[in-house]
Amino acid sequence: MNNTLNNNDSAQPDHEEPIVDVETVSEEKPTETSSLELEPANASFDLNNTSVQSLLSSLGSNFDANTLISKMFGATQRRGSLLMSPIGLPKKTRLKVFANGFFMTFDKVSSCKTKHFWRCEFKNTCKARMHTDIHNKEIESFIHDHNHKKPTDEEVSLYGLDPTTIQRNHVYVVNHISDPTQRRKIRKQVAEQEAAAKRLEEHNQVEIQKQQTAATMAVVQSAYAQMVKTNLQSTSSLTQPSASPRPMLLAQLPFLKSEIASPQRLDYDFKPSTSKIHEIVENPIAQIPRHSETKAMSDDLLNHPTFQSNFEIAQKLRKIWKRKPRITPKCSETPTEYLEFYVSNKNESEDQLYVIVRIEQRNEEMFKDALEKFIVQKCLGRVVIGISSTINVVISETILKTWENGQFFLLDVSNPNCWQLKYVDELEM
């Protein structure tokens, strides 16, 4: 039987393949053959397979099994080439590019198949988007701005890019996968440096403010002391007391004594002259200033050489100490759920009649309804509060929750599309 097999084997041409035997194997175990066809050509072969053992036993002991197996795999390869999965990025990793200082990850292809949509790598916190042409990779548009700072040059270098050669409006595909731990360390170091610089800047600002305040107070104190000293000097020079009559009286006593009659020569008809004494006695030490004298004193004060400088210093001090009227409503640290305020319809008359208005909840709808009921008119637009002649702020729930109760407002309804409130400070009333 062995001789017969050898003769048949020698008679068979070398280029022919045992197609019948392979079909027989496929008929016996179709599942095993299908699994064999899906495996690559260089995979390991299981010799303990039942179909293979039956085939070898039918062929005899002198048959070369390696030749048959190699032919079987050759036939399997010619039946269809297997598609190998490309070795690329790891699982759950999107294509990343670098453009205009930020890293963007691939999102999707547009429905028109002409654009690529990209989003910021921090997609959970940043809404920045970018659109590029699908053919030439040119940047077509940006949507939203990045809400974070650009990565540093060290972070860019981690992805195999040279920061010195980066050009604007160019898209650079990132092929290198960086170490996320190393990048987090770099970002942490940058954040710590920025925080330290911010603290230093705040400290310097506080010190500068203290120095400026100290210098201002020193100037104010010196100016105030100079003004007080000058006023005292001018007052003392203008209000010096009149000369006392006592020294004058003592100076005239010798002349009075000479006119008194001597006791040896009594003359009963002699009458001493007391005119000088009456003149001295009748002159009072202090007299009430008359209107003409007060006016003369005021003229002397105005003509004083230091009056102008002292007056200017006093005006500056008054401006420093005087509080300026507020232009915005007062804020409360513990606001209530309700809001009470006084409002008046702005008109040409100087007298304004204020009416108290109360809303139970601090929101824009109830605030607007309360004003409409007060004016008995419908507002077609929004209600704003005027900060200046050119600045108006739309009143919202956030603003209303900070207001203090009991404040005064003027309402201007001349424009039906935009009602304007103006805060009235106590100093303006």
Image (cartoon, rainbow, N blue to C red):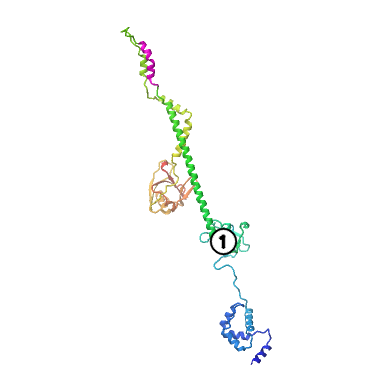
Indicate the quadrant where residue 142 lies: bottom right
Q: Quadrant of the C terminus?
A: top left
Start-end of magenta stretch: 243-259
The answer to whether residue 249 is left or right of residue 308 is left
Q: Nearer the viewer, residue 97 or 356?
A: 97
The residue sitting at the front extreme is 264
Q: Does the magenta stretch include residue 204?
A: no
Q: Main secondary structure of the magenta part?
A: helix
The image position of residue 385, as x and y in percent, is: 45, 48
Check disc 1 and report its element: helix, strand or loop. strand
Q: Residue tagged by mark 1?
A: 104
- Is 255 magenta? The answer is yes
- 3 lies above or below 323: below
Give neighbour class at mark 1: few <14, some 14-19, many 20+ (Cα, 10 Å).
Answer: many
The amino acid at mark 1 is Met
Extreme-bottom residue of the structure: 1
Q: Residue at x 60, y 89 (%)?
A: 58
> Can the viewer see residue 343 in this picture?
no
